[in-house]
Amino acid sequence: MTRTVPRPSAPERVVLAAVGGPATADEDGVVWSDETLLEELRALAVSAGAVVVGEVVQRRDTIDKTFFIGRGKAEELGREVKAKDAEMVLFDNDLSPAQGKNLEDVVGVRVLDRSELILDIFAERARTREAKLQVELAQLQYLLPRLKRMWTHLSRIRGGIGLRGPGETQLEVDRRVIRDKIITLKEKLARIEKRRELQREGRGDVWNAALVGYTNVGKSTIMNRLAGERLKAEDRLFATLDATTRRIDLSTGEAVVLTDTVGFIRHLPHHLVASFRATLEEVFHADLLLHVVDVSDPQHAEQMRVVEGVLEELDVVEAPRILVFNKFDLVAPAERAGLRARLLADHPDAVVASAVEGRGLVALEEALTAFVRSNEVEVHLSLPLAASRTLARLYEVGDVLERRYTDESIEVDFRARPEVVERLRGEGVRVRAAS
């Protein structure tokens, strides 16, 4: 029951609008020009199936409480809509319900803000039951305070002698229905999360890594290369919504469970982060994050800060990270040497890669192996001769380096996560430090 904006037979003609502060350089020296300001909104509009026919940008220090942009700019936006025969205005900013209604009254067509546009794209891309539930929850949370604007056919029953209503307006009934639906969706997602927790416990003996990054930076392509599969990987925003998990067997024998997660984006709606928290829990429980960056994007430094901001919002601040500067093949050949040198000077442990061409993946596997080995412990185990089942399990939960049989026991040199070793010790296995 996810709510999507109905798709017309022909692409909708839209005008883009945005409000930004003075065009000054940020802390990295990046100047956010009008073109840069609308670049991502333009990509979102195309992802939603629209045709961009016009753009309006206003620079101002303060936001207008009535129209978000100034009255004069709103009227200019209306003239642009009329001149370009547009059917909709897409705002790069989030609008209050009142601002959205006031703008619609001036421009004469429907106005969607950034959150509603992203939610519409998510609703179209959701495939699994969990993703659909998450999108529906986010949509209802967005819709609730906007009922009066979005459902203008609903009106309050007039009171008075002979005209007294049933005591509750239709608008209030609809609000109550939505609140009840939100509660139901949260309960369903909670049950899914319990099952997900059981799945995580089932793979708790293996190292868990999660691919994170801005949307459309190539996370799914990296997953394909490492897993040797062909998962969905497209050159568009939010091609992947559902977390995908695969076991990766490294060439040195170590195993890592790798999860591909939904991409982040600038000004990702807070209620969307909240509703997708179950999926993003994979990030929270990961032992290692692979932060993938599209190094060919001129704004990749800003995108890195956005990703770190979302991770901070999710309370994921302590997890170790490996930076993967991807899409190096899209960098102009004349700039590659200098860019590589600057990247590695600032981030010595990073991996520079091109997942499409398969370059840099050996270095990425080596970085994964180095992380695993630096965090594992090597011990010596003594097992009874009859403990063949325990011996077999050792191959599943760690790395058996050597085993020797004596008249009384099986002697095993073993390397694994510290938690695995402690659990074996608790099960009565004799453990001592490796010689």
Image (tube, rainbow, N blue to C red):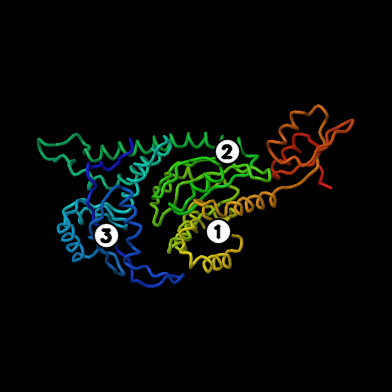
Mark 3 or mark 1: which comes first in sequence? 3
Q: Quadrant of the N terminus?
A: top left
Residue 388, how many percent across, how many down? 77, 28
Q: How many labels were placed on the picture?
A: 3
What's the mark number on residue 50?
none
Q: Secondary structure at mark 1?
A: strand
Identify the residue at image location x=74%, y=28%.
389
In this rendering, is residue 208 above or below 214? above
What's the mark number on residue 17?
3
Identify the residue at image location x=57%, y=58%.
351
Mark 2 or mark 1: which comes first in sequence? 2
Residue 311, how many percent across, how many down? 50, 54
Residue 185, how many percent across, how many down? 39, 36
The residue closer to the viewer here, 318 or 345, is 345
In this rendering, is residue 49 above or below 16? above
Q: Secondary structure at mark 2?
A: helix
Q: Residue furthest top?
A: 386
Left or right: 347 in relation to 428: left
In this rendering, is residue 321 above or below 25? above
| Residue type (three-letter) at the residue carrying disc 1 | Val
Tell me where residue 189 sits by quadrant.
top left
Tell me where residue 59 sits by quadrant.
bottom left
Q: Residue furthest left?
A: 162
What's the mark number on residue 352?
1
Left or right: 164 in relation to 34: left
Q: Secondary structure at mark 3?
A: strand
| Residue type (three-letter) at the residue carrying disc 3 | Ala
What's the mark number on residue 200?
2
